[in-house]
Amino acid sequence: GTRGGAGCRVGTTCRPMKRVVIADAGPLIALARLGQLAWLPRLFGKVHVTPWVASELVVGGEFPESSVLREALAQPWLETVDLAEQGLTDWEPSSREWMHLHQVDPGEATALAWASHLAAHGDAPLLVMDDFRARAAAGHARLPVVGTAGLLLLARQNGMVTAVRPWLERLRSQGYYLSDALIEAVATQAGE
């Protein structure tokens, strides 16, 4: 459709653009490991996950962060959405296409499909994901994305932490792959 003024389609009732934060499992697990899932509602208010991401958070065995993630999924700030109810009636073929084209898992594919749908309908999705292929797919589709390191920067900018480097080092010590270059770049961006 032709675009009218800010976020309005010609021939439709104008409504404000809606910001929708859509998280993949990786950053949620990372923040749970750091004991800092509470950053998300402080930074964004509400965060959404697809049913596949929600299931990734609770299946696959018991990990130290499993109970924290289950508790978070029961909180009003972390909402599991029904994609068909959100207007994405073709989520299955759309997700399969993302998986096939970009070699991403079902959770990432459903998040990318929903974010694309929202953007096509005049909303402003923000994907929260760490996976390299998923981030590349988001970039290819011109969908904004932030990863765990970016969330640390936002937490720093919002006065929730005094330094990002210790948090990045802690994540790395817990098995997250973070290159020295990434840690230096994020620390430099944070003014450390």
Image: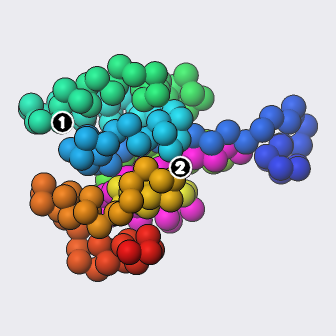
The reply to whether the C-beta atoms of the residues labelled 1 and 2 are less than 8 Å apart is: no
Q: Position of residue 165 (x, y in %)?
A: 29, 67
Mark number displayed over residue 126:
2
Name the residue at 73% across, 42% down: 17
The one nearer the camera, 79 or 5, is: 79
Which amino acid, by three-letter code, is at mark 1?
A: Glu
Name the residue at 46% across, 22% down: 76
Magenta-drawn stretch contains 130: yes
Left or right placement of residue 8 versus residue 116 in this view: right
Q: Position of residue 124 (x, y in %)?
A: 64, 47
The residue that disc 1 covers is 65
**Does residue 146 appear in this view?**
no
Magenta-drawn stretch contains 37: no
Dot 2 crowding, Cα within 10 Å, few <14, some 14–19, many 20+: some
**Does residue 180 appear in this view?**
yes
The one nearer the camera, 151 or 83, is: 151
Q: Mark 1 and mark 2: span between their CA atoms? A: 24 Å
Name the residue at 17% across, 62% down: 172
Quarter assignment of residue 75: top left
Q: Earlier in the sequence, mark 1 or mark 2?
A: 1
Image vertical order of residue 4 relative to residue 79, above or below: below
